[in-house]
Amino acid sequence: MKRTLIVANWKMHLNTHEASLLVKRLNDRIPAHRTIEVVLAPSLLVLQPLSLEIDRRKFRLAAQNAYTKDAGAFTGEVSFTMLRDLVHYSIIGHSERRIYFKESLEDVRDKVQAAVRNGIAPILCVGETKQERAAGETSRLIHDQVTTALSNLTPEEVENVVIAYEPVWAISTFGGEIAKPTDIKRVLDLIRHNVTELYGASTAEQMRLLYGGSVTADTAPGYLEIEGCDGALVGSASLNYQQFADIVEGAYRVNHRQEA
Ligand code: PEP
């Protein structure tokens, strides 16, 4: 059984005290669900204290980024090796990193490989900008982002990679247009098709694909009902405990309906 993955990307928000407060509030509102995995991605600084506070039956941790090398003279960087005992996952290739920090397809590929080498499951973000969409480049762009990022992995390693389709135009801080379920399904199908061609149908079937882009408690159930959508990556709404707890609750209700 694939557990639905709900990921909170807190970005560069919340210091240690604020993060701890948010976790307490989430802990009060979110029960442990057999069919749902809830992952929190705080800032690097907060990972260590939070790892001691979270109820591990309810929450797992993710990094938002790390460096491609395991150790060395790379001032200011943190490696996946340093994170391996702290996190299960790492977000990699988020559009903010690709756009603001100029991460190339190859940088993302090397980070995916470094995470896997250190036993951390990548949550690989892919997605096109508004201009690329208007120019009809979505399929080619998604293909290039997916195939380059996975190119140094074996099929067994690819199975554990999570891919989040996050159209840049739908992310709240880049415009926040509401994506249609049909648009999302088309790209999720495309991603599974790309993975099938490279690594086989069973690998593609095992992988979890998420949707991210202005997901709220109101919109989450509609996205989670899309066939082939295995979860959500949540930005802004994850900073609001009521919204985020309601998103998890919505995921539970969708799973329950699908099981019934
Ligand atoms: C994100 O940045 O990963 C994201 C999905 O943000 P938001 O939910 O705020 O659009």
Image (cartoon, rainbow, N blue to C red):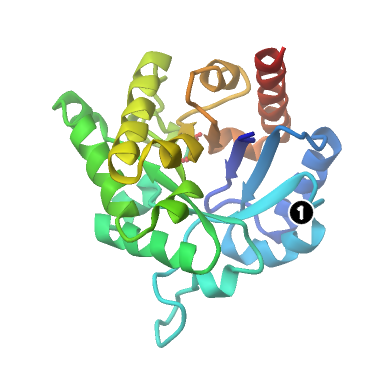
Q: Picture coordinates of residue 151 (x, y %)? A: 29, 56
The residue sitting at the bottom extreme is 73
Which residue is rendered at x = 50% and y = 73% of the image? 78
Count of marks, rendered view: 1
In the visual, does 19 lie left or right of 156?
right
| Above or below: residue 198 compared with residue 188 | below
Which residue is rendered at x = 17% and y = 31% of the image? 137
Quadrant of the rendering where the C terminus is positioned: top right
Of the pair 218 and 62, the residue shown nearer to us: 62
Residue 75 occupies which quadrant of the picture? bottom left
Residue 200 occupies which quadrant of the picture? top left
Residue 250 occupies which quadrant of the picture? top right
| Above or below: residue 118 compared with residue 125 | below
Amino acid type, residue under disc 1 in the picture: Ser
Q: Picture coordinates of residue 27 (x, y %)? A: 82, 42
The residue where tag 1 is placed is: 20
In the visual, does 135 lie left or right of 103?
left
Of the pair 192 and 12, the residue shown nearer to us: 192
Q: Picture coordinates of residue 201 (x, y %)? A: 39, 36
In the visual, does 219 lie left or right of 152?
right
In the visual, does 8 lie left or right of 78?
right
Element marked by disc 1: helix
Which residue is rendered at x = 28% and y = 39% of the image? 197
The residue sitting at the right extreme is 28
How packed mark 1 is, by other alpha carbons closer than 10 Å (few <14, some 14-19, many 20 or more), is some
Quadrant of the rendering where the N terminus is positioned: top right
Q: Picture coordinates of residue 9 (x, y %)? A: 55, 45
Q: Is mark 1 within 8 Å of ligand 1?
A: no
Of the pair 244 and 21, the residue shown nearer to us: 244
The residue sitting at the left extreme is 135
| Above or below: residue 145 compared with residue 78 | above
Which residue is rendered at x = 26% and y = 60% of the image? 106
